Image (cartoon, grey):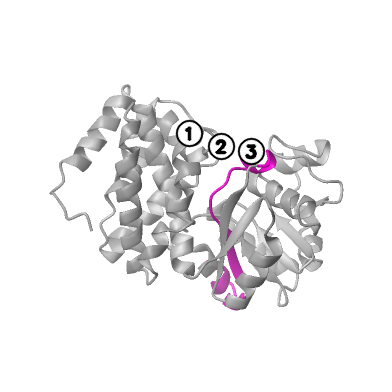
């Protein structure tokens, strides 16, 4: 698995290309659509605000070329655009012998489907699909600060091969053993990141402890209802990613929540917004109680502080609604 094409050259896509070329010596193509801001910055300067691309990396806007030459295709784009993007990939080249790795986190809003399910519906064998998720910020990785991540797949041999091949002194990989829980947990941690930002913006960061405990618990319920192992909520894909998502100033989702409460716009991608909408629909469909997710949804879509003069009071109103619920058993 030496020839790798990374489709998407934004924050994570550019890092993955950098990591696999510089740390693993892979033959890497980095693809982005012509005219796209992230692609044009890399084309013109060879770097972005996160990484400087190794000279061995081939930057291209030719999707057919990037797909055709690869043994492994890594996709790192906005999750809500995956369904349309996979159609473009299938129209561009024959992918019957390709391995797909999704390095992205989300749930499709319209269908409630996990991202790997979208690829399977498009005709790609589940035996050739893996997901790469877990904690870590690019700014830390490029500074030499290591972390642990997880690769999961229906195909045990594939996830072992990928994890063993991609590991380095910068990333220790674990084999996932529940792709449902891995994908749902990875997506849901972004919702909890927004909640953490709301607490920070509202001046009640001490509630992050209960947020971590109760957030993981409600995600565990959802994973179980979807047929996964509820213990996955306490693994690297979800609880293991809380430090980077709920506390770091690098976290887009945490920053989104904090700035939202302060009545300010956050211009970068925060996947947790649409994931909150998707999880709310899943919870209603499956009869699973998701109070924190519902609160995040209300703040993002119903009671938005951007149209409210006092975001901190709104934050406290949401917290009080959560606190006024009937007393529950913890487990």
Task: Identify which residue, 22 or 219, lies in the foreground.
Answer: 22
Say which quadrant the C terminus sits in.
bottom left
Residue 118 located left or right of residue 59: left
Q: Residue at x 22, y 42 (%)?
A: 322
Q: Quadrant of residue 311?
A: top left
Identify the magenta region: 118-144
In the picture of the structure, the residue carrying the numbered disc 1 is 255
Q: Residue furthest top?
A: 309
Q: Residue at x 39, y 38 (%)?
A: 196
Magenta span includes 136: yes
Characterize the local packing of mark 3: few (<14), some (14-19) or many (20 or more) Cα atoms within 10 angstroms: some
Marks 2/1 in contact by CB < 8 Å: the verdict is yes
The spot of residue 262 in percent (x, y) is: 40, 25
Marks 3/1 in contact by CB < 8 Å: the verdict is no
Precedes in sequence: disc 2 or disc 1: 1
- Cα distance between the residues tagged 2 and 1: 10 Å
3 vs 1, front mark: 3
Q: Residue at x 71, y 77 (%)?
A: 96
Task: Identify which residue, 165 or 188, lies in the foreground.
Answer: 165
In the picture of the structure, the residue carrying the numbered disc 2 is 268
């Amino acid at each position: 698995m030496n020839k790798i094409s990374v489709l998407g050259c934004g924050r994570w896509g550019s890092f993955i290309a950098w990591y696999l070329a510089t740390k693993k010596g892979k033959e890497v193509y980095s693809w982005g659509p012509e005219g796209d801001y992230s692609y044009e910055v890399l084309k013109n300067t060879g770097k972005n605000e996160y990484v400087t691309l190794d000279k061995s990396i081939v930057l291209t806007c030719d999707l057919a070329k990037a797909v055709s030459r690869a043994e492994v295709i890594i996709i790192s784009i906005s999750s809500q655009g995956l369904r349309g993007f996979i159609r473009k990939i299938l129209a561009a080249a024959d992918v019957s012998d390709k391995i797909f790795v999704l390095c992205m986190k989300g749930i499709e809003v319209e269908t409630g489907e996990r991202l790997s399910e979208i690829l399977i519906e498009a005709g790609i064998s589940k035996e050739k699909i893996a997901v790469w998720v877990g904690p870590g910020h690019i700014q830390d990785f490029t500074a030499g600060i290591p972390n642990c991540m997880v690769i999961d797949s229906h195909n045990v041999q594939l996830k072992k091969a990928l994890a063993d091949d991609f590991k380095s002194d910068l990333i220790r990989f674990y084999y996932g053993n529940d792709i449902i829980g891995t994908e749902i947990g990875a997506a849901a941690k972004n919702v909890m990141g927004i909640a953490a930002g709301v607490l920070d913006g509202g001046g009640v960061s001490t509630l992050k402890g209960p947020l971590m405990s109760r957030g993981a618990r409600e995600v565990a319920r959802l994973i179980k209802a979807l047929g996964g192992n509820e213990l996955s909520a306490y693994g690297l894909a979800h609880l293991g990613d809380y430090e980077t998502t709920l506390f770091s100033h690098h976290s887009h989702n945490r920053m989104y929540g904090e700035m939202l409460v302060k009545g300010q716009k956050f211009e970068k991608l925060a996947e947790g917004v649409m994931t909150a909408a998707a999880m709310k629909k899943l919870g209603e469909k499956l009869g699973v109680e998701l109070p924190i997710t519902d609160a995040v949804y209300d703040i993002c879509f119903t009671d938005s502080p951007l149209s409210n003069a006092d975001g901190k009071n709104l934050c406290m109103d949401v917290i009080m609604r959560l606190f006024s619920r009937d007393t529950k058993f913890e487990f």
